[in-house]
Amino acid sequence: MIELDDIHKRFGRNEVLKGITASVRKGEVVCIIGPSGSGKSTILRCINGLESYDGGDIRIDGMRVDRNAASIVSIRTQVSMVFQRFNLFPHRTALENVVEGPIFVKKEPRAQAIERGRALLAQVGLIDKADSHPPQLSGGQQQRVAIARALAMQPKAILFDEPTSALDPELVGEVLSVMRKLADDGMTMLVVTHEMGFAREVADRVLFIDGGVIVEQGQARTVLNKPRHPRTLDFLRRVLHPL
Amino acid sequence: MEKFWRDAVEFLPILLNGVALTIIVTLGSLILSTLLGLVWALMRVSGIPALSWSSAAVINVIRGIPIIVLLFYLYFVMPDLGIALTALQAAIVGLGIAYSAYQAENFRAGMEAIDKGQIEAAQAIGMGWWLTMWRVVLPQAVRVVLPPYGNIMIMMLKDSSQASTITVAELALQGKLIASSTFKNTSVFTLVALMYLTMSIPLILLVRHFEKQAARR
């Protein structure tokens, strides 16, 4: 469903992606792990055209991603994104954040969008916060609203860019459990994360990226429990046992 | 003091005529400068080099010309080019253009103060440039922009007196005319000053309200 073929990306003279080839099938949950600065987030940002790429091909169900083409709008409505820092619109309520895309981008009838928006807020456990503004919500609540906002577009897949990295530790669980439920419901997900527990339990596959290349990939259990590459081993050791 | 009150009663009706014109000039040029300023600012942040350069050039040219020269140009030179404006029209257009540069810089600062993540979130749900501006950037920029906007309003109220140089009989010119025919300079100009101050006070309070509101977010 999402196919990356030999993606290269440069920021000035710094090449951050050096030929990434990967794919995500429908209904699959793929986690991308790796040290910071390895290019993990850049991959996601290229997939929905927030960033351009310099070489290779990204295709969503066969449609090529080109951030300067008119087709990018349609791609973005098919592939939603959840950001590390939530990026909710602070001047709108939780419900308004959720229905913004359906009403103004997809031109859905307002009543229908609101009805579905409320259902989505209920799904992430925040129906009682529908009329709250983002600054009145905790980080975990904001991220759950952001997930509802992504779902409201009725996407084929959702990209998660370190969705729990900006959260206080005690709020991580509520976001992960919403994500796990999505995975159980068959949502296609590509998740950049440092939550190894989540990757181990929820992901079908894990990609380990370092220095702009995929160092190792495979079934979550295999990569996380019995990594073959020394760099993967070293990274996992540092993440799991920081002292 | 008693003399001053007598003069006040006598001159006030004439000066109030001037006040009406002052308000018309200020409001007219405020609306024009806001619209033009918004256009310059949107061009500036459009990301299209030709638009953003030409907007920067226009802003700099406008900023570099004194308001009074702009007014003379519109009122005395434009008729030679076949465009005859009344004094009132020339005053509104001139002040509107002159202040559009400051409005534009204020609006631009407001838009650039919006977190980049907001724009990315808008793009990520498929919004194009206009929709992102209209639904996400401008509503948030308004809060940043309002306090300086209020200050610009006060400056425009006072600078509307420059319209007197092209014969618009607003408050300052009415005052000058009365003073030169009665020689009661002290009474007249004290009255004029007090009237400008009276008109400014609501605006000053408005700015304070905007500032409090902006600080609360």
Image (cartoon, helix red, strand yellow):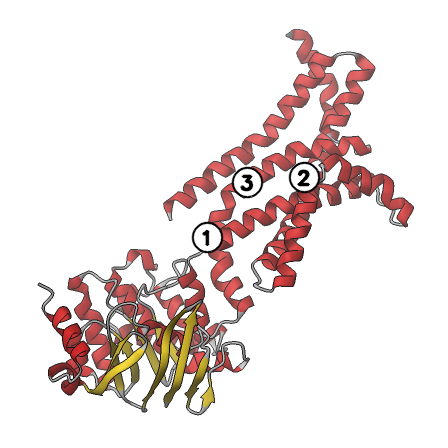
Q: Amino acid at mark 1?
A: Ala
Q: Choose top left, top right, bottom left or bottom right for residue A163.
A: bottom left
Q: Amino acid at mark 3?
A: Gly
Callout 3 secondary element:
helix
- Distance from disc 2 to disc 3, alpha carbons, whole Å, reads 13 Å
Pointer 3 local density, CA inside 10 Å: few below 14, some 14–19, many at least 20: many
Q: Residue at x 41, y 79 (%)?
A: A8
- Res. A142 image quadrant: bottom left
Q: Is residue B143 left or right of residue B40?
A: left
Asked if the residue at tag 1 contacts the one at tag 2, i.e. Cβ–Cβ closer than 8 Å, the answer is no
Q: Is residue A116 visible?
A: no
Mark 3 or mark 1: whose residue is earlier in sequence: 1
Please tell me which residue is depicted at 11% across the width and 83% down the height of the picture: A225
Quarter the N terminus of chain B occupies: top right
Q: Disc 3 marks which residue?
A: B150
- Residue that label 1 marks: B113
Q: Which mark is residue B26?
A: 2
The disc, 2 or 1, on the residue closer to the chain's N-terminal end is 2
- Image mark 3: chain: B
- Residue B104 is situated, as x and y percent measured from the top left of the image, at 60, 49
- Identity, as a three-letter code, of the amino acid under mark 2: Thr
Q: Measured from the top left, where is residue A132 in percent x and y?
A: 32, 60
Give the spatial CA distance, label 2 vs label 1.
28 Å
Residue A115 shown left or right of residue A166 in the figure: right
Q: Nearer the viewer, residue A125 or A18?
A: A18
